[in-house]
Image: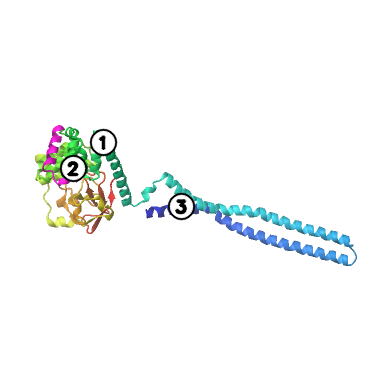
């Protein structure tokens, strides 16, 4: 906020300087002219007064010497006084005409100096985004508060009209986005017949139960199997089933499921890259080369780097969660810490998975954590360390995640700091 306000003030000041500059020499000339006019007027007044005194003294002498009668003397003196008044009135009138004009010229720069900042502020309030001046954490808190209010309104509406299945689905997914797993489960429980006939809703319920239990064993796994029987290509069910397989070291199953999911994902998108990275990681864990199991043309997995090579390019640092966002998390929320190349594919170079309870975390990322053999930290010249708190626990980013990133660094950097201080819309 402060840099923006300083920049805006500097621009307004620069505009004022450019607008008021023409008045600077004019003002100096005006002062010089006014001074000259004042001196000239003063000299004229003194001269007129002296002339009138001399003529009056001459009239008095003529009257004293008997050259003017009393009547003629009185008439001549009155005429002399009228001339003096007329001369004075002319000078005063000229000054009176010049003064307002000079005053108007002096007031114009002052009015510009006052009105321009007010106009700038008014236009920004009308056309800009004043709310963007608030700190990022405040904006995120405000957005969360607005969403909570909307969800509360929706919940009240559903209690009044409980026969609306679409409304319960919307409410359940809203609770899921907020991480309110118990409320999401209760909302889905209001429409069991609808859930049992929809693969996507079965996957949603499986995710909610898995989040609550911290594992897929049991009911969540059964629901995912039911979802895939209804729709073998259901994206959410494929994704979660792949995660379940990976976490239980069934890497071949994870590869198969995610490859099916990849067919329904836009090529080159961030989601596609994350899925490809997961597949590559599963391949590495499985200990297979791409040529053996996953098609010809892939490069065999290189030999694992030795400890000296890993230490040379390893990145070490600390991940912290901003205090303002601490209330938006649960201790069991998943945190992904990963390295990403500045120039190159979006697929992470190395990934570490922890929980919010482990923050602040001192981390080390090296090529042993690479998601694809040969595409680790040592393969790039510049990178950035990013961290993301995933409310859903999924590797794919989703609205409401909390994120943070380091500055651009080089392989082997030490003392890198990552502050998680932003909530994605």
Residue at 85%, 61% (x, y): give it: 74
- Badge 1, how many Cα within 10 Å: few under 14, some, many 20+? some
**Residue 118 in sight from this viewpoint:** yes
Q: Residue at x 82, y 66 (%)?
A: 57
Under tag 2, what secondary structure? helix
Circle number at residue 208: 2
Instruction: Name the residue nearer the viewer: 350 or 1.
Output: 1
Find residue 178 and report its image quarter: top left
* Prevalent SS, magenta region: helix
Q: Report whether 28 appears left or right of 249.
A: right
- Disc 2 to disc 1, C-alpha distance: 18 Å
The residue to which callout 1 is attached is 167
Please give left or right for residue 327 compared with residue 249 in the image: right
The answer to whether residue 30 is left or right of residue 243 is right
**Residue 403 painted magenta:** no
Marks 3 and 2, the one that precedes in the sequence: 3
Give the mark toward the camera: 2 or 1: 1
Q: Which residues are magenta?
A: 212-230
Q: Position of residue 255 (x, y in %)?
A: 13, 40
Give the mark, 3 or 1, whose residue is nearer the N terminus: 3
Image depth: mark 3 or mark 1 in front:
1
When asked about the image quadrant of residue 271, the answer is top left
Q: Which residue is mark 3?
A: 12
Who comes first in sequence, dot 2 or dot 1? 1
Indicate how the structure is coloured in the image: rainbow
Is residue 235 or residue 223 the one in the foreground? 223
- At 75% from the left and 61% from the top, the residue drawn is 48
Cα distance in 3D space between marks 3 and 1: 50 Å
Residue 357 circle label:
none
**259 above or below 143?**
above
């Amino acid at each position: 906020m402060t840099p923006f306000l300083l920049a805006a003030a500097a621009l307004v000041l620069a505009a004022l300087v450019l607008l008021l500059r023409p008045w600077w020499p004019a003002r100096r000339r005006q002062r010089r002219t006014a001074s000259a006019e004042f001196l000239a007027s003063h000299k004229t007044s003194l001269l007129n007064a002296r002339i009138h005194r001399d003529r009056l003294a001459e009239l008095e002498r003529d009257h004293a010497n008997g050259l003017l009668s009393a009547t003629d003397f009185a008439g001549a003196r009155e005429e002399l006084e009228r001339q003096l008044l007329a001369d004075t009135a002319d000078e005063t009138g000229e000054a009176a005409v010049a003064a307002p004009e000079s005053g108007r010229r002096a007031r114009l720069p002052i009015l510009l100096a006052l009105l321009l900042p007010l106009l700038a502020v008014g236009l920004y309030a009308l056309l800009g985004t004043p709310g963007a001046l608030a700190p990022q954490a405040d904006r995120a808190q405000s957005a969360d508060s607005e969403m909570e209010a909307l969800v509360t309104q929706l919940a009240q509406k559903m209690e009044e009209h409980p026969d609306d299945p679409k409304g319960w689905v919307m409410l359940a997914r809203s609770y899921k986005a907020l991480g309110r797993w118990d409320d999401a489960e209760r909302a889905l429980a209001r429409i069991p017949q609808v859930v049992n006939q929809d693969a996507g809703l079965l996957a949603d319920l499986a995710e909610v139960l898995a989040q609550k239990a911290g594992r897929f064993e049991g009911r969540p796994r059964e629901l995912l199997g039911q979802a895939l029987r209804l729709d073998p290509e259901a994206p959410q069910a494929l994704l979660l089933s792949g995660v379940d397989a990976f976490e239980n070291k069934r890497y071949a199953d994870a590869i198969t499921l995610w490859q099916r999911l990849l067919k329904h994902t836009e090529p080159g998108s961030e989601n596609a890259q994350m899925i490809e990275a997961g597949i590559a990681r599963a391949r590495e864990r499985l200990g297979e080369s791409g040529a053996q199991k996953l098609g010809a043309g892939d490069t065999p997995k290189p030999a694992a780097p030795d400890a000296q090579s890993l230490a040379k390019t390893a990145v070490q640092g600390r991940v912290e969660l901003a205090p303002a966002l601490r209330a938006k998390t649960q201790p069991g929320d998943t945190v992904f810490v990963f390295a990403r190349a500045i120039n190159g594919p979006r697929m992470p170079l190395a990934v570490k998975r922890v929980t919010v309870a482990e923050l602040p975390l001192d981390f080390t990322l090296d090529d042993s954590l690479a998601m694809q053999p040969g595409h680790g930290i040592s393969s790039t010249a510049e990178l950035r360390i990013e961290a993301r708190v995933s409310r859903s626990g999924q590797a794919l980013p989703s609205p409401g995640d909390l994120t943070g990133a380091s500055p651009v660094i080089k392989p082997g950097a030490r003392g890198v700091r990552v502050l998680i201080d932003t909530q994605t819309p």
